[in-house]
């Protein structure tokens, strides 16, 4: 294709470039500037310097609470979900005749889980006289006040997202199935038991997908909105008032665009720092086949 | 653990020794344990959905009296009342709105992502490295940080309360994930056929249309299916941009029905929830293989 102009490829990616500039790059920069302004949509944005950030970090109790709840949510949901997904993938990675049937059954919640209908269902399942409490009392237990107790309420959202472990599991399963079987045999001949084979052969080989899932799920968990918005409305006592909910309220209910942008940037900074730490640490624990580092 | 079974298969011809008998027993136990565990977990996973379908045919009184899913006196009342909604529109109207959001968005995504992926995977041009890096960066960029200025931009353009804010960014290959997925797929396809076509005098756009697109079909179908599913499920987008009930998609209509029928008529809400999930379920079961392939090759959120 030597005769083509060297700009020909640019024509094909032009839609992306335009979209990138208009809908990503410009808003990204604009939100940074907005976070230093006071803007209520009625008058022009007014530059206020670092006032928004000062308020956030010194006087805003709601922000403190919201940040704390968000961190608790992310650091419980992501590990629980990924551990469960990996566990089921390992159990499933065997010569089972019904492997496809199980894979489908586990994947369905992932497909539907983002829907508002599932959040609605969750509200009914965990209601005082809902399905979960009926099962608990049926087994002779005490009914649990899921939405009245602050610690329980957040956990119902964690459970909802763990229920959607299917897509992470399918990625793990694909990685497990691509591990060279001869490595297992070699380890078995050397006398390694199932747990040691898993720990020292399987796990290192699938670290790239663990890393991928970890990053994607963390970025996503920090942006959880539908769950708390529909299931708990942020309550009780703001115990499920995650940062995206706070940003939404500030921006689209109070129309305090500047302040909302400042919260969004703090959230963004947290996600960035964690992502950078993950990338930096990945050199130490993620194994890439064909890599010269030993 | 697969090693044990393979060793076993090879040894099958020779009369079993004591160790082999032990290994076989271990394998049987392992297999039984796996099946039991997977079945129990599977049932727990699926039961809420089955219960929801059953409950949507129950009376309100029955719904909170038993954990079983089979309704004692099945009734369609939930569906009939729910379909009417508390608004001047039926639920069918909201379904049409959802389709009217989804279809142009899916078409725009498929076309723009194919063009852009073709550009990235098959051409060299100045700035390609940096642009490709932005695809990855956008993949990781949390939407939360761009949402407010996007809203302000669409407000300036007078697009609020229309479907344009939901359509247009996708038509400019705004979903980096899909671009990335198609690029990955395209990189794995050999270029021989395309080069032969070029030698025979085809232009790049002809090559794309007649050679590349047919080979890319599975990837493009995956893109369409995921976009369909995500857009049907999308709640925050319509919540921010659509303000009049007339334009509500199903997700907002469902939220509205909770707000207006709170504390009673739960069977109506569950009935409409079941209907909301039905298109996604049908599409998933018709095209499962594309979902599994799409997510195993590119990796997906969800």
Image (spheres, coloured by chain):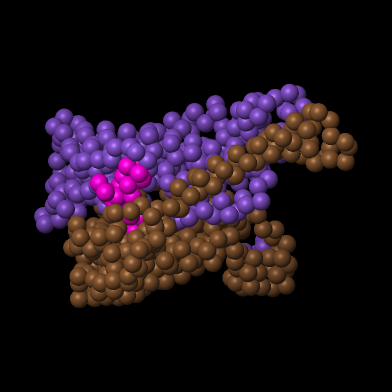
Chain colours: A purple, B brown
Identify which residue, B203 or B230, lies in the foreground: B230
Image quadrant in which the N terminus of chain A is located: bottom right
Q: Quadrant of residue A207?
A: top right
Which quarter of the figure is the C terminus of chain A placed in? top right
Measured as percent of width and height from the top left, residue A262 is found at: 23, 41
Q: Which residues are magenta?
A: A114-138
Q: Is residue B164 left or right of residue A91?
A: left
Asked whether A42 or B286 is in front, the reply is: B286
Residue A141 in view: yes
| Left or right: where A18 falls relative to B27 | left
Residue B119: x percent and y percent? 55, 60
Is A289 one of the magenta-colored residues? Answer: no
Task: Decide if residue A161 is on the left or right side of residue B5.
Answer: left
Q: Is residue B208 visible?
A: no
Q: Residue furthest left?
A: A43
Front residue of A191/B128: it is: A191
């Amino acid at each position: 294709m030597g005769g083509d102009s060297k700009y020909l490829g640019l024509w094909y990616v032009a839609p992306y470039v335009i979209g990138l500039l208009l809908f990503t790059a410009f808003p990204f920069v604009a939100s940074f500037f907005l976070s230093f302004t006071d803007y209520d949509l009625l008058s022009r944005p007014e530059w206020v310097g670092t006032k928004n950030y000062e308020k956030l970090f010194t006087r805003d109790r709601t922000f403190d609470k919201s940040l704390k709840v968000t961190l608790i949510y992310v650091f419980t949901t992501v590990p629980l979900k990924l551990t469960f997904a990996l566990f089921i993938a390992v159990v499933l990675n065997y010569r089972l005749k019904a492997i496809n049937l199980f894979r489908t059954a586990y994947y369905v919640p992932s497909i539907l889980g983002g829907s508002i209908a599932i959040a609605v269902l969750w509200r009914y399942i965990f209601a005082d006289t809902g399905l979960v409490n009926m099962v608990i009392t049926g087994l002779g237990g005490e009914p649990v006040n899921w939405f009245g107790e602050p610690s329980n309420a957040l956990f119902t959202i964690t459970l909802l997202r763990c229920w959607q472990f299917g897509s992470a599991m399918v990625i793990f399963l694909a990685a497990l199935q691509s591990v060279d079987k001869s490595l297992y045999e070699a380890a078995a001949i050397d006398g390694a038991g199932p747990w040691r084979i898993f720990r020292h052969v399987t796990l290192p080989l699938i670290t790239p997908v663990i890393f991928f899932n970890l990053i994607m799920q963390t970025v996503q968990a920090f942006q959880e909105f539908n769950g708390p918005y529909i299931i708990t409305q942020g309550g009780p006592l703001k115990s499920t008032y995650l940062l995206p909910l706070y940003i939404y309220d500030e921006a689209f209910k109070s129309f305090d665009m500047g302040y909302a942008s400042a919260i969004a940037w703090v959230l963004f900074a947290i996600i960035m720092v964690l992502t950078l730490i993950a990338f930096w640490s990945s050199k130490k624990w993620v194994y890439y086949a064909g890599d010269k580092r030993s | 653990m697969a090693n044990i079974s393979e060793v076993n298969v090879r040894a099958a011809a020779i009369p079993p020794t004591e160790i082999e008998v032990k290994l076989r027993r271990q394998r049987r136990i392992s297999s039984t344990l796996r099946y039991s565990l997977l079945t129990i977990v599977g049932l727990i996973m699926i039961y809420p959905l089955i219960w929801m379908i059953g409950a949507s045919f129950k009376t309100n009184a029955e719904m909170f009296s038993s954990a079983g899913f089979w309704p004692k006196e099945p009734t369609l009342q939930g569906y009939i009342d729910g379909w009417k909604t508390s608004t001047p529109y039926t639920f069918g109207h909201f379904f049409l709105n959802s389709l009217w959001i989804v279809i142009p968005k899916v078409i725009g995504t498929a076309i723009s992502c194919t063009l852009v992926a073709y550009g990235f995977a098959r051409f060299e041009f100045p700035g390609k490295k940096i642009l490709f890096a932005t695809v990855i960066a956008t993949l990781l960029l949390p939407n939360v940080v761009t949402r407010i200025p996007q809203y302000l931009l669409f407000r300036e353009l007078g697009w609020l309360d229309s479907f344009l804010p939901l359509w247009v960014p996708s038509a400019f290959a705004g979903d980096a994930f899909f671009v990335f997925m198609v690029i990955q797929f395209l990189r794995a396809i050999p270029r021989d056929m395309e080069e032969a076509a070029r030698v025979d005098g085809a232009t790049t756009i002809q090559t794309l249309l007649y050679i590349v697109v047919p080979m890319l079909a599975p990837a493009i179908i995956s893109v369409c299916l995921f976009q369909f599913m995500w857009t049907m499920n999308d709640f925050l987008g319509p919540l921010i941009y659509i303000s009049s009930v007339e334009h509500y998609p199903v997700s907002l209509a469902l939220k509205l029905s909770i707000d207006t029928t709170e504390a009673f008529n739960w069977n109506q809400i569950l009935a409409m929830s079941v209907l909301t999930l039905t298109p996604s379920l049908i599409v998933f079961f018709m095209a499962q293989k594309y979902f599994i392939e799409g997510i195993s090759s590119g990796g997906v959120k969800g």
